[in-house]
Amino acid sequence: MNNPTREVTIEKVVINIGVGEGGEKLEKAKKVIEILTGKKPVQTIAKKTVRDFNIRKRQPIGTKVTLRKKDAEDFLRRALWVKNFKLPQYSFDETGSLSFGIRDYTSFEGIKYDPEIGIFGMDISVSFRRRCGHRVTARLVNRRKLPRKERVSREEAMEFMKNKFGIEILEVK
C-alpha cells in the first residue's frame, strides 16, 4: 500500500549566478536569469569581507531566483536537457538535495548568444520534500526540527529524479 503523504515532490529550484561584483556585470546576469525563467531575480549580498577577492560586506555580488511548482519542473526539465539527462552521483547530498552547474546559458534550447550580455554560467539547486509533514517546522507554537522519517534521503531523491525526469545517475569514483 502506497501512502500519498510519503510521496517525494520538488519543493523549490533556485537558480544562482555569482559575478563577484555589482554594476554592469550584475545587470547582465539579471537579464540572463530573466530570459531563462521569465521571473524577476533578486540580488545576493556579501555576508562578510573577503580581501583576496576584493569583496566588501553588504556589497551586491550575485543574483538568484526561486521557482516553485510547475515553473520549477519546467525549468528543471530544460536544465536537465542541457546535461543530457545525466548527473553524477555526487550531485545529490545526504539531506536529499540536488545541485549542479551549467557553464553557459546559451546551452539552453532556443537561446542564442548575445554579444551585449556575454557568457554566464549558473548554479542550480533543487530541494525535495514529502507531500505532508512540514507544518512541524513552520508553526509558531511548539516548533521542532523535522523528524528523520519525514526527511528525504539521498536514495529517495535519486529514485524520484530517475522516475520523474528519466535521468541517468553516473557513478563517479
Image (cartoon, rainbow, N blue to C red):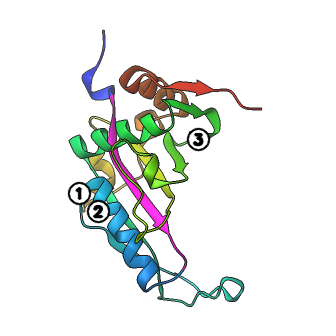
Mark 3 residue type: Ser
Mark 1 residue type: Gly
Taking depth in this image into account, of 143 and 78 the one nearest to the observer is 78
- Within 10 Å of the Cα at label 2, are there few (<14), some (14-19), or many (20+) other Cα atoms? some
x%, y% of residue 136? 31, 49
**Marks 2,3: beta carbons within 8 A:** no
Q: Nearer the viewer, mark 2 or mark 3?
A: 2
Q: In the displayed image of the protein, which residue is found farthest to the front? A: 115
Q: Is residue 37 above or below residue 164?
A: below
Q: Nearer the viewer, mark 1 or mark 3?
A: 1
Q: Is residue 137 magenta?
A: no
Separation of disc 2 and disc 1 at Cα? 5 Å
Magenta span of residues = 8-20
Separation of disc 2 and disc 3 at Cα? 25 Å
**Marks 2,1: beta carbons within 8 A:** yes
**Disc number for residue 96:** none
Q: Which comes before the other along the chain, label 2 or label 3?
A: 2
Taking depth in this image into account, of 83 and 7 the one nearest to the observer is 83
Asked which quadrant contains residue 134, the reply is top left
Q: Which residue is mark 3?
A: 91
Q: Which residue is mark 1?
A: 38
x%, y% of residue 109? 37, 41
Mark 2 residue type: Glu
Separation of disc 1 and disc 3 at Cα? 26 Å
